[in-house]
Image (tube, rainbow, N blue to C red):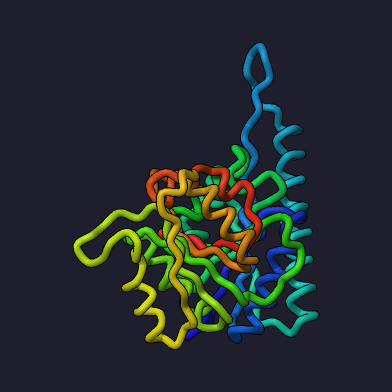
Amino acid sequence: MGYRTLLAILDTPKTTRQVTDFAVALANQFQAHVIGAHAEAIAMVPLVAPMEIPDPATVQALQDMAHQETETVETMFREIGEREGLSHEWRSFVTSSGFNSAALIDSARSADLVIAAQGDSGLLSDSRSELESFLFESGRPVLLIPHILKEPKPIRRVLVAWNGSREAARATFDALPFLKAAEAVEIFTVDAADTALQTGAIAGAEIAAALARHGIKVTLTASEKSGLDPAMAIENRLSDSSIDLLVMGAYGNKRWWEMLFGGVTRTLLDSMTALTLLSR
């Protein structure tokens, strides 16, 4: 089992090389095909006071800038793909809805894994709300690359943030190719409640056993009544254990920060230190 089709979201020239380099590394690991996708937004029509007449010259200048960015991103992607002998293809969409275009969402839904960059200001900045909405709607696992991680490195240690929810279960099994290839996988719970199947102290034992049946080297860790915000507890665990990949469920109303344990803040993703796989 592995990821055979990767969709790389190439939104700006600044993040294109980073995302493509990670896509190449994963394609080599899983013998995958990579689709480079870029949305070229149609320029909004500025109005000139006092008669509110559209300014054609400004509209054309904005559209020319957007198209030039598209060409730059495409050139970078194709050059890296050809140099690395990558099985790849390029898809560009000119759309007023940007990353929420139906064609791009359809491309995502036919991929095993979507790869995107956090960006210097974090994925959750206001200017990235369009991309954020697309990722939420794609229905596929999304691998986010923190801006501090400039080059790919092996994923040896994985932390699964577990709360027993549908989203957490989806993320865990969507991450199976990474989990099976890792040297160590840790199931981590924060202030878990007792259930009919297990106490909070051993929350995650059943999913740990299920992963072990896949041949995964898995351990179970619980943070009980620590007093820490769940996001802080996870961040501390990421740092203490030198984690390469965080796996967690995403849920809420189209806002990445309304997720995990019912209330982990956007701080967790804005301060990403490890690759993060999200599923909904």
- In the image, is residue 223 above or below residue 218? above
Asked if residue 163 lies left or right of residue 79, the reply is left
Asked if residue 208 lies left or right of residue 10, the reply is left
Q: Residue at x 45, y 66 (%)?
A: 221
Foreground residue, 222 or 74?
A: 222
Q: Residue at x 32, y 59 (%)?
A: 200
> Dividing the picture into quarters, in which one does residue 201 lie?
bottom left
> Dividing the picture into quarters, in which one does residue 71 lie?
bottom right
Foreground residue, 236 or 149?
A: 236
- In the image, is residue 171 above or below residue 83? above
Foreground residue, 66 or 148?
A: 148
Q: Residue at x 76, y 62 (%)?
A: 150
Residue 58 in percent (x, y) is at 74, 32
Residue 229 in percent (x, y) is at 48, 44
Foreground residue, 265 or 82?
A: 265
Q: Residue at x 51, y 77 (%)?
A: 179
Asked if residue 243 lies left or right of residue 220, the reply is right
- In the image, is residue 161 above or below residue 257? below
The answer to whether residue 230 of the structure is visible from this angle is yes
> Dividing the picture into quarters, in which one does residue 158 lie?
bottom right
The answer to whether residue 255 of the structure is visible from this angle is no
